[in-house]
Amino acid sequence: MSKIETKIETKQDQITFDIIGKVSSPFKEKFAIPRQPGLANCAKGVITLLNTANNQDLVRGIEQFSHLWLLFIFHGTKEQGWKPLVRPPRLGGNKKIGVLATRSTFRPNPIGMSVVKLDEVITSPTEVKLLISGIDLLDQTPLVDIKPYIPYSDSIVDAQAGYAQSEPDAVLDVTFSNSALESLQKTQISHPQLLKLISQVLAQDPRPAYKKKGEDNNEYGICLYDFNIKWRLISASLIEVFQVS
């Protein structure tokens, strides 16, 4: 089984985790991944359990739960290291605060957690898969644990969350050129919710915080599934998707 090694306390002390599964995701690159789970409910993925975790007994009864906690490794950023102070996008990228006071992907140990909706459990004698949605995970994200989400203990109605108390607004409207719509029409059978997914992702304005001030004439691209989506800002509050290939 694949291993993830996480050092603690001193260089001599280690904890070793087994990778129990990987996530297939529409997000093929870090840019434009929703900054929190649930912001794009059309973002669907598949968890495939691996090696000794690929066992039907491990998920017996899991279908009773509508949502799951995923504990995973930030495999796309772990090699880049971390710093004690970071600039959260919710603060405009201008103010530094401690990394442990944020959800930054650059952490002392590259461990993330995400709550996702469980849509379906698929088992066979040779394979166990969980279909999930509302994900914010890079494709091929390795999992180290899965736990059921329990509303009475996991949802604290009077919790305080500082600068992230409320859900971020969808700050931009998204429109599509005629040629982009023609391309999307051809994807209806294989990816019926692609247009909605693009809209949900881009409405959150995935640009770096410093790009959100003043005029921006750049063209941007994101990769979803096997599609390259090109877009640009045409006003302070409107994005146009002009190419889907």
Image (tube, grey):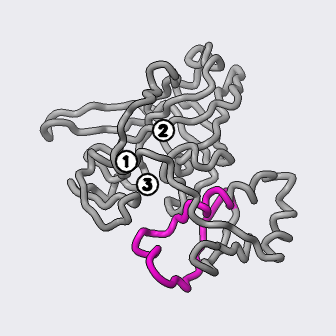
Point 64% across, 81% down: residue: 234
Q: Identify the element where label 1 is drawn.
A: loop
Q: As drawn, is 183 to the left or to the right of 227? A: right
Q: CA distance from mark 3 to mark 1?
A: 15 Å
CA–CA distance between discs 3 and 2? 16 Å
Mark seen at residue 114 = 2
What is the three-letter code of the residue carrying label 2?
Ser
- Callout 1 amino acid: Arg
Q: Are marks 1 and 2 in contact (CB under 8 Å)?
A: no
Say whether residue 66 is left or right of residue 85.
right
**Residue 43 falls inside the magenta stretch:** no
Marks 1 and 2, the one that precedes in the sequence: 1
Of badges 3 and 2, the one in the foreground is: 2
Whether 97 is drawn above or below 8: the answer is: below
Q: Tell me where residue 237 sits by quadrant.
A: bottom right
The x, y position of residue 220, in whole percent, is 58, 75
Where's the N terminus, which quadrant? top left
Q: Residue at x 65, y 48 (%)?
A: 43
Chain part drawn in magenta: 199-226
Secondary structure under the numbered disc 2 in the rendered image: strand
Report the residue marked by disc 3: 76
- In the rendered structure, does residue 205 fall within the stretch colored magenta? yes
Q: Which quarter shows the C terminus?
A: bottom right
